[in-house]
Image (cartoon, helix red, strand yellow):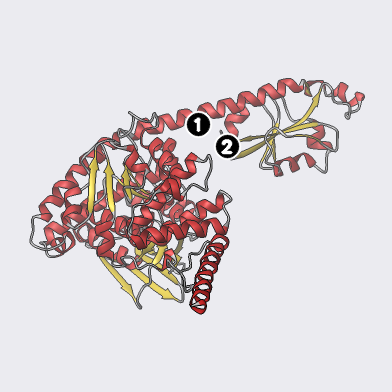
């Protein structure tokens, strides 16, 4: 009887020590280990994501913000792009939060109700809050010397007017080269490093994201980012990039 | 601001590009011109600090003034508190004795004038070119209508529909592309920075020239019975370029067409060596005079031989092409057949671009 009891105590004690060890290891390395010391959640970059262009094209949410009807929305939709059209900035929150993967933005007549600098003000603000947001400058004002910032800040430009095939080529190129989870993950890491977060904290955040992907849960950002104090701007930026990353899985 | 305007405005003598200039009100200090061998005041131009002061080896006050891209040095002055110029010299250089505060006010005024001029230039440019806004809007409508027509043709994708369409549809679509490209060139004239707008991407020069060759095919045959021959001995690799590179074939072919004699051939040759593509455009037409062969790449410059041969053109194409190639670390070169003595002969434009 005593042997069984000792055996149980040793087993429970060993398990407890093992459990505490995995927690301590996790605390110092940012990695989650299971009972047999295997990684609980894979590295965020090791998850399989859609690779085919057609799949990425279907997933990429595009919004065109233009006060004119020059952008061939119907042609894009007919070719399987997920594309919305706004005559002016209708929901700035959606733009800032990373809801749209590609924003095609005109410079004039689209945002005077929210910024005196119109499209330029919107572009500057989005890029400040979410530097990894893909924005295409779409305007017929590329001769405008006073608007140089608009063109320089944007990731790509489409001159107005342009033909459908040229526009498609530019957007396809962005989807192929920029609309990749690795780019957003790297961008998130860079943002954290710039704000003096340690490698350990970055790994912990990766681990949290990995956990959400594996469990297919909605992120509780308040809990995940509880290690960041008094940095509202930064939290907003991380949430925007984080949401974009999670969209791929 | 240029030298002439500065000369008119300046109260003080000055140096620009190592040349000494009198102002309308005050000539150069004789010591600076005749008695100073070192002319160390010129070293001030090495500085990038606007309004930097310097007392030269002869004891005179000099001040650097940076206006736009130009560096002016107000030289040979004697500030009222200057103690380095001997009293005897001061007596014979009374005109050059000035208050430092006056010089400071003068430089401030000039900087304000420059800022005002820049503002007005921006304003005028915008006003002059705002008319293109309406034109571009009309072009957008034109594009949409054309695309709608093509979209109704049989085929799965737009590209397929266009590919399978009648030649007239293709010509219509291509012509619209040509007009929009030409509109894009206007943007470059006004704002050369627009050359580098957008990301660089892999672009195939052979395909670009092929496309433009088709666009110009009609004009070439109809106008002067000119044939365009595009050749490449090997597969041409892609170049990593800004979208503006698309203007290069347009400009070179337009230029060659404009200055080709009737019933002649324009040859476009692309050569691929290890990691470079060389583009050579040859045509038979009027020679550019020897003294102007570099000037043809200047803004608004046209050689007399060109003006006599063709009334078309304002002398902007080659300047745009050169700006675009410079932005891609390349250069457009012009050669002529040196064995020919007459006014007409073989003209060659060439450039190299690194391939991916």
The kind of secondary structure element at disc 1 is helix
Q: Do callouts 1 and 2 mark residues in contact (Cβ within 8 Å)? A: yes
Disc 2 marks which residue?
Answer: B68
The x, y position of residue B136, in whole percent, is 26, 41
Quadrant of the image occupied by residue A40: bottom left
Q: Residues within 10 Å of mark 1 (few under 14, many from 20)?
A: some
For the view shown, which residue lies furthest in the front direction?
A1
Of pointers 1 and 2, the one earlier in the residue sequence? 2
Q: Is residue A105 visible?
A: yes
Residue A240, disc: none
Question: Which chain letter goes with mark 1?
Answer: B
Q: Residue at x 82, y 43 (%)?
A: B38
Q: Residue at x 18, y 61 (%)?
A: B159
Q: Is residue A74 left or right of residue A225?
A: left
Q: Nearer the viewer, residue B258 or B203?
A: B203
Vertical comparison of A236 with B55: above or below = below
The kind of secondary structure element at disc 2 is loop
Question: Which chain letter goes with mark 2?
Answer: B
Disc 1 marks which residue?
Answer: B118
Quadrant of the image occupied by residue B35: top right
Q: Nearer the viewer, residue B300 or A230?
A: A230
Q: CA distance from mark 1 to mark 2?
A: 9 Å
Q: Residue at x 50, y 74 (%)?
A: A5
Q: Nearer the viewer, residue A82 or A20?
A: A20
The x, y position of residue B180, in whole percent, is 27, 48
Q: Is residue B192 visible?
A: no
The x, y position of residue B54, in whole percent, is 78, 35
The x, y position of residue A99, in whole percent, is 32, 47
């Amino acid at each position: 009887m005593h042997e069984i009891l000792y055996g149980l105590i040793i087993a429970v004690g060993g398990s407890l020590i093992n459990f505490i060890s995995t927690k301590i290891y996790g605390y110092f390395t940012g990695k989650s280990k299971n009972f047999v010391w295997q990684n609980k959640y894979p590295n965020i970059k090791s998850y399989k994501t859609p690779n085919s262009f057609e799949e990425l094209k279907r997933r990429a949410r595009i919004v065109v913000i233009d006060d004119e009807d020059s952008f061939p929305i119907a042609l894009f939709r007919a070719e399987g792009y997920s594309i919305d059209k706004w005559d002016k900035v209708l929901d700035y929150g959606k733009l800032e939060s990373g809801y749209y993967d590609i924003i095609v933005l005109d410079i004039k007549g689209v945002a005077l109700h929210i910024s005196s600098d119109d499209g330029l003000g919107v572009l500057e603000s989005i890029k400040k809050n979410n530097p990894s947001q893909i924005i295409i400058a779409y305007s017929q004002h590329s001769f405008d010397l006073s608007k140089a910032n608009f063109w320089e800040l944007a990731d790509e430009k489409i001159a107005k007017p342009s033909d459908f095939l040229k526009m498609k080529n530019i957007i396809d190129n962005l989807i192929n080269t920029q609309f990749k989870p690795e780019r957003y993950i790297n961008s998130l890491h860079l943002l954290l490093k710039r704000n003096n977060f340690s490698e350990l904290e970055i790994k912990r955040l990766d681990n949290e994201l990995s956990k959400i992907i594996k469990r297919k849960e909605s992120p509780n950002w308040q809990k995940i980012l509880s290690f960041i104090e008094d940095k509202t701007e930064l939290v907003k930026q991380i949430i925007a990039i984080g949401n974009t990353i999670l969209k791929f899985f | 601001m240029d030298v002439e305007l500065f000369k008119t405005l300046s109260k003080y003598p000055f140096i620009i590009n190592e040349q000494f200039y009198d102002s309308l009100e005050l000539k150069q200090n004789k010591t600076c011109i005749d008695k100073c061998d070192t002319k160390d005041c010129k070293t001030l131009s090495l500085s990038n600090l606007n309004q930097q002061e310097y007392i030269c080896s002869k004891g005179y006050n000099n001040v650097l003034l940076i206006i736009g891209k130009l560096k002016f040095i107000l030289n040979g002055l004697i500030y009222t508190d200057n103690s380095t110029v001997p009293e005897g010299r001061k007596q014979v250089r009374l005109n050059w004795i000035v208050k430092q505060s006056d010089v400071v006010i003068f430089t401030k005024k000039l900087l304000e004038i420059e800022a005002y001029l820049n503002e007005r230039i921006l304003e005028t440019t915008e006003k002059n070119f705002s008319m293109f806004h309406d034109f571009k809007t009309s072009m957008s409508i034109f594009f949409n209508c054309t695309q709608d027509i093509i979209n109704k043709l049989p085929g799965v994708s737009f590209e397929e529909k266009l590919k399978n369409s009648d030649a007239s549809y293709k010509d219509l679509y291509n012509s619209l592309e040509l007009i929009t490209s030409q509109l894009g060139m206007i943007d470059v004239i006004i704002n050369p920075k627009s050359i580098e707008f957008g990301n660089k991407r892999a672009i195939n020069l052979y395909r670009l020239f092929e496309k433009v060759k088709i666009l110009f095919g009609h004009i070439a045959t109809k106008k002067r019975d000119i044939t365009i021959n595009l050749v490449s001995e090997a597969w041409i690799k892609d170049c990593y370029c800004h979208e503006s590179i698309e203007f290069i074939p347009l400009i070179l072919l337009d230029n060659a067409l404009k200055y080709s004699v009737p019933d002649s051939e324009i040859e476009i040759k692309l050569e691929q060596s290890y990691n470079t593509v060389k583009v050579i455009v040859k045509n038979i037409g009027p020679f550019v005079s020897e003294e102007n062969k570099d000037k043809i790449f200047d803004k608004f410059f046209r050689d007399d031989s060109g003006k006599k041969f063709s009334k078309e053109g304002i002398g902007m194409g080659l300047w745009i092409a050169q700006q675009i190639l410079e932005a891609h670390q390349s250069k457009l070169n012009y050669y002529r057949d040196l064995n020919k003595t007459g006014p007409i002969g073989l003209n060659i434009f060439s450039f190299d671009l690194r391939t991916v």
